[in-house]
Image (tube, rainbow, N blue to C red):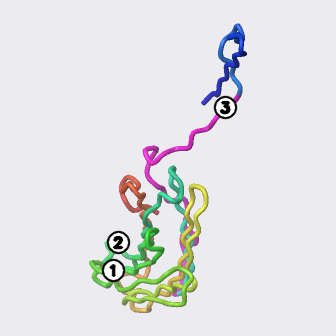
Amino acid sequence: KTLYALPVNAAGQAPSGGLTSVGTWTVPASAAAGPPAVDSLTPSTGQGSLVDFVLKVSDPAGASDVASVQLLIGATANPANACAVTYSAAQNSLTLASDSGASVAGQVTPGQSSSVSNSQCTLSGAASSVQAAGNSLVLSLRIQFKAAFAAVGGSATKNVYALPVSASGQSPAGGYTL
């Protein structure tokens, strides 16, 4: 946006050209600008039973507009028989879905020495963190997969899905991404 000024003296005199352009101003995007997005996941592929996932999401209305982020590792995007972790910004908590996916197996606070498990994985609170700055939120999760999880879904290879949700309930079109 362009900033204009019109100086007028005590005698009521102003420049003959009227308003003068004196600068520009950038208006930040609002929540109406769109839903949050998944920017990256590290590692995005690999193998092993212990992994430190780093998920970066962004929101045009700012990182403080991200209400929750779910990271789901499983044969499908269904939280049943998966390792599904949800970060809640309001509670500053990480919850792990139960084996059925319909309830919560437990909850930890990022950076606190506790862990929670289901039959597929264990989530470490002490080795997990959340950082927000500008429009970006970075979720770091340490997950230990259990050996039996390799057989779930008929294959040891699992898919990784992410779903950020804004405070207004917006999420990426099509839901899960990655």
Rendered image: mark on residue 76: 2
Instruction: Name the residue type under label 3.
Output: Thr
Instruction: Name the residue type under label 1.
Output: Gly
Answer above or below: position of 151 versus 165.
Answer: below
Determine the residue located farthest toward the front in the rendered image. Answer: 10
Q: Quadrant of residue 107?
A: bottom left
Magenta run includes residue 13: no
Instruction: Name the residue type under label 2.
Output: Thr
Rendered image: mark on residue 112: none
Give the label, 3 or 1, closer to the camera.
3
Residue 102: horizontal and vertical position, in percent?
Answer: 27, 78
Q: In this figure, which residue is indicated by the disc labeled 3?
A: 24
Task: Give me the C-alpha separation between circle 1 and circle 2.
Answer: 8 Å
Q: Secondary structure at mark 3?
A: strand
The answer to whether 72 appears left or right of 143 in the picture is left
Image: magenta residue range = 23-49
Residue 142: horizontal and vertical position, in percent?
Answer: 54, 82
Residue closer to the observer: 136 or 167: 167
Answer above or below: position of 20 versus 133.
Answer: above
